[in-house]
Amino acid sequence: MDTGPLSRFLPPLEEGVVSTWLSHHAPAGGWLLDPFGFSPRLALEAARSGHRVLVTANNPITRFLLEIFANPPPESEFIAALADLGAVKKGDERLENHLRSLYFTQCEKCEQQIEAQAFLWRRGEEAPYARVYECKHCGDSGERTSTEGDLERARKIADTDRLHRSRAFERVVSLNDEDRVYAEEAIQHYLPRPLYVLTTITNRLDSLNLSGNRKRALTALTLLTCDAGNTLWTHPAERPRPKQLSTPNQFREHNLWMMLETGLGLFSSTGADVPCVAWPNKLPETGGICMYEGRLRDLAHEVKKEIPIAAVIGSIPRPNQAFWTFSALWAGWLWGREAVEPYKNALRRRRYDWAWSATALHAMFTHLNELLADDVPVFGLMPEAEPPFMTAALTAAQTAG
């Protein structure tokens, strides 16, 4: 299973599938269209195969992932970015030490103070029932019952939660915004401790004077913690790919500083060294990715006039309320309210049924039918195929002509 950044939300694709199909249906150097923009890996594989890929992507998070997967900063920049963040002062101590201290616990065997890797919670309770650790002093490891110190630390952080929760809201929507209630509902899937860590990091992300590459690296690491910090981590891991915004009965609260460290090599290992530009900038004939920030219907006239599409590729989106709602939150936390505005529908909508999916796909296929010549091949992948999903997609395609 793919363990890359945000892999639990992105389509699970087998390497080589799209490039093999393209070798039989589209000559290298030509233009491909990915109208869904749902799978960064698919677009990258096509571009590495020597094709120019026009990707329309309305989701700011998948756009960012595609851009950073195509040209990730070197691992040294990720390491330096985390070091810069950790060196910032929080009162009289380094920020790294302050954030690590939030996860301190006591080893059950040797009673030394150590860092927990995670705390385990039951939905609706005010403190964790267990912690997970690996003691470097005596070697004791595993899941252990929470101590009174763990409970007291959780209560102390919860006492300041209202302030940090309010700050988290205001990075997504303004105080008088009618969509504030939806942001509040979504942020309920963050416990006080991870929310405090995230607001602290995103505030520093704004204030640190970093080079372009280093800021991209720190933004990517922060995105990992945005996902690691929510309550959609079932314990034990029965639902590794959540679709609904629903906190499980038992869940895992990760140590977010450890998650930052885990991410140091994740993005650099995706390095594709693929040219990646924003529309309407030009690409070399040797291949690359051109990203359009928006929907296909807004670009259709320009595409028809300027770009000879040789084939359409894409991972057909399976409805995912959790990822789409979180994407709106994370965009606000990383880049501010302006980044959320074009994607606010995802924040508002609470239910995506198969009828909604069929209607949305029908609209997309209708646009494609009007845009493309009759002989243009279309390759749509459904990596998580199930009967209702296949019915929605095939019905939409057939009725669109």
Image: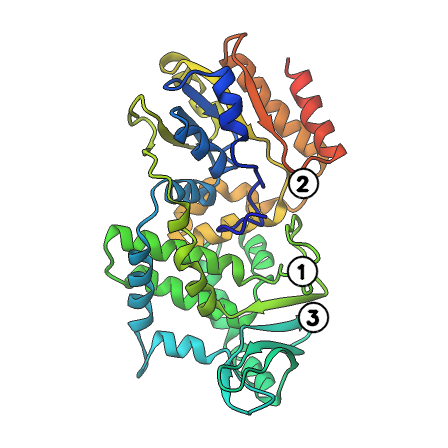
Query: Which residue is disc 1 drawn over?
Result: 237
Residue type of the residue flagged with mark 2: Tyr
- Per the image, the residue denoted by label 2 is 352
The C terminus is located in which quarter?
A: top right
Q: Is residue 178 visible?
A: no
Could you tell whether 32 is left or right of 324 in the image?
left
Q: Position of residue 216 (x, y in %)?
A: 33, 51
Q: Is residue 6 above or below residue 43?
A: below
Between residues 98 and 6, which one lies in front from this camera angle? Answer: 6
Residue occupying the far right of the picture: 387
Q: CA distance from mark 1 to mark 3?
A: 19 Å
Contact, CB < 8 Å: mark 2 with mark 1?
no
Mark 3 crowd level (few <14, some 14–19, many ≥20, 10 Å Cα): few
Residue 53 visible: yes
Foreground of the two, 33 or 358: 33
Q: Which mark is residue 124?
A: 3
Residue 190: give its label: none
Determine whether 175 is above or below 299 in the image: below
Q: Position of residue 50 (x, y in %)?
A: 38, 25
CA–CA distance between discs 2 and 3?
Answer: 25 Å
Camera-near label (1 vs 3) is 1
**Looking at the image, residue 401 lies above or below residue 253:** above
Instruction: Please name the amino acid that badge 3 sits on.
Output: Gly
Question: Which amino acid, by three-letter code, is at mark 1?
Answer: Ala
Mark nearer the N terminus (1 vs 3): 3
Foreground mark, 2 or 1? 1
Rendering quarter of residue 280: top left
